[in-house]
Amino acid sequence: ARHRITHTGERPFTCGACGKGFSQNSNLAAHRRIHTGEKPFGCRDCGKRFGEGSALVQHRRTHTGERPYRCGECG
């Protein structure tokens, strides 16, 4: 049911601060952090905080040295 809304273009969840609409409430919740400055995702190594979990995952690679994407030209 939630996926179907992707195809209809319906955006029933609206940000009260800027009016931007979202198809899922979870996306609205993540968006609200832009306005509030909330950063609930913290790095356990250095303490740096992020508003999105995916940004923390990317940041963690600075500590682990993981490089999951390779350049097609230079490796």
Image (cartoon, grey):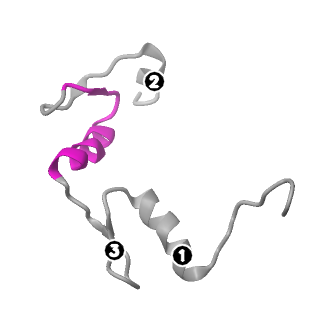
Tell me where residue 36 appears, x and y as whole percent. 15, 50
* Residue that protrudes farthest toward the left in the picture: 16
Type of residue at label 2? Thr
Majority secondary structure of magenta residues: helix
Q: Is residue 44 left or right of residue 39?
A: right
Of callouts 3 and 1, which one flags the residue occurring earlier in the amino acid sequence? 3
Q: Secondary structure at mark 1?
A: helix
Instruction: Please name the residue shown 48% across and 18% down the image.
Output: 7
Q: Secondary structure at mark 3?
A: loop
Instruction: Calculate the distance from the C-alpha at mark 2 to the C-alpha at mark 3.
Output: 33 Å
Instruction: Calculate the distance from the C-alpha at mark 3 to the C-alpha at mark 1.
Output: 12 Å
Instruction: Please name the residue shown 31% across and 57% down the image.
Output: 51
| Between 7 and 15, the one nearer to me in the picture | 15
Type of residue at label 3? Lys
Tell me where residue 38 appears, x and y as whole percent. 20, 58
Of callouts 1 and 2, which one flags the residue occurring earlier in the amino acid sequence? 2
Of callouts 2 and 3, which one flags the residue occurring earlier in the amino acid sequence? 2
**Around disc 3, counting alpha carbons within 10 Å, would you say few (fewer than 14), some (14 to 19), or many (20 or more)?**
few
Instruction: Give the mark toward the camera: 2 or 3.
Output: 3
**Around disc 2, counting alpha carbons within 10 Å, would you say few (fewer than 14), some (14 to 19), or many (20 or more)?**
few
- Residue range highlighted in magenta: 19-36
Residue at the spot of label 1: 62
Q: Is residue 64 left or right of residue 74?
A: left
Residue at the spot of label 3: 48
Is 22 part of what is drawn in magenta?
Answer: yes
Tell me where residue 53 appears, x and y as whole percent. 40, 60
Residue at the spot of label 2: 6
